[in-house]
């Protein structure tokens, strides 16, 4: 595929999205994590808006108000993100930011898009686990059970509503699990990319895999020589866009402006 040509998206449905500060000169498109929605970014977007950026906040397929758009796969989500960029981003181009499963989608967008459509990329919490292949089908059932058990214990009413709306279905959880334990091969990326990993020591559930960030960086043509980086931070956790929104917003602004990052972000060697 030509780096300057968008894929053919005839007859594709449109993701639900919010558009904020439509008069901004450049667009930042933020992709939420698995089982979430664009609401995750509520405390990150003010910094972008205050600094004059147009912001697009989609709900991924099978999530939030895009729950009826099925199925979720990284490739299909990336195609629909391209559709939003082409139709709704300023000048048909955007800076892409993805968190967790959204980082996998952002990487796919970066792989397929050229600089005419993708201005820069931030992929935070891009994790890939590589267990023995025969164990991959065994992961989805316990994840499905534990996720709904925890959600029910935390907010039973919200969990019942999610069941009724078809959110966090077994098919979705199966695909999410497959994505992180049997990840697709990454093609060449020609976009300046920042891969961010949490190196928190709190618990293994709250930290990322810096090696996965390094692997993503290796897919960037030119790597560090074109300004791309893979960094880690010891004081943030996987969901730091929710826990540290001001820091996340500052990181986005620094990266898309090609400015220095906070010195606590250290390169992954």
Image (tube, rainbow, N blue to C red):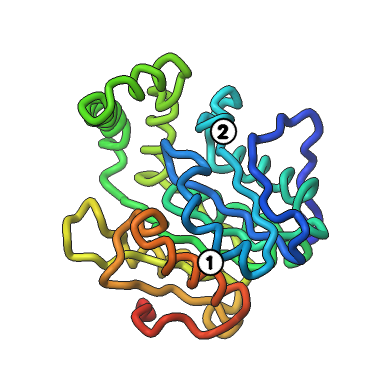
At 63% from the left edge and 68% from the top edge, which residue is drawn? 120
Separation of disc 2 and disc 1 at Cα?
26 Å
Could you tell me residue 129's position as x and y percent? 31, 51
- Is 65 in front, or is 222? 65
At 36% from the left edge and 38% from the top edge, which residue is drawn? 177
Q: Earlier in the sequence, mark 2 or mark 1?
A: 2
- Is 210 in front, or is 258? 258
- Is 20 in front, or is 107? 20
- Is 127 in front, or is 138? 127
Q: Secondary structure at mark 1?
A: loop
Q: Which residue is mark 2?
A: 61
**Up-down: is 255 above or below 116?**
below
The answer to whether residue 138 of the structure is visible from this angle is no
At 79% from the left edge and 41% from the top edge, which residue is drawn? 8
Alpha-carbon neighbours of circle 1 within 10 Å: few (<14), some, or many (≥20)? some
Could you tell me residue 123's position as x and y percent? 49, 61
The image quadrant that residue 139 belongs to is top left
The disc at residue 219 is 1
């Amino acid at each position: 595929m030509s780096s300057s040509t968008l894929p053919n998206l005839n007859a594709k449905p449109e993701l639900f999205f919010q558009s904020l500060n439509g008069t901004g000169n450049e667009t930042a498109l933020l992709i939420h994590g698995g089982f979430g929605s664009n609401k995750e970014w509520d405390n990150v977007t003010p910094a972008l808006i205050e600094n004059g950026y147009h912001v697009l906040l989609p709900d991924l397929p099978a999530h939030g108000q895009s729950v009826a758009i099925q199925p979720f796969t990284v490739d299909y989500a990336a195609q629909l993100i391209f559709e939003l960029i082409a139709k709704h981003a300023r000048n048909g181009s955007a800076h892409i930011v993805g968190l967790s499963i959204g980082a996998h989608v952002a990487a796919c967008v970066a792989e397929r898009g050229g600089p005419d459509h993708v201005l820069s990329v931030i992929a935070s919490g891009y994790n890939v686990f590589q267990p023995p292949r025969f164990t991959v089908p065994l992961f989805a059932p316990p994840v499905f059970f534990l996720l709904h058990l925890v959600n029910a214990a935390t907010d039973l009413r919200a969990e019942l509503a999610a069941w009724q709306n078809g959110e966090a279905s077994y098919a979705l959880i199966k695909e999410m699990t497959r994505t992180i334990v049997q990840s697709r091969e990454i093609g060449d990326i020609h976009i300046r990319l920042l891969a961010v990993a949490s190196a928190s020591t709190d618990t293994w559930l709250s930290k990322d895999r810096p090696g996965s960030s390094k692997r993503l960086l290796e897919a960037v043509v030119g790597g560090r020589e074109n300004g791309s980086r893979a960094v880690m931070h010891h004081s943030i956790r996987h969901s730091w866009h929710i826990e540290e929104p001001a820091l996340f917003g500052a990181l986005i602004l620094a990266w898309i402006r090609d400015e220095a990052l906070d010195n606590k972000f250290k390169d992954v060697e």
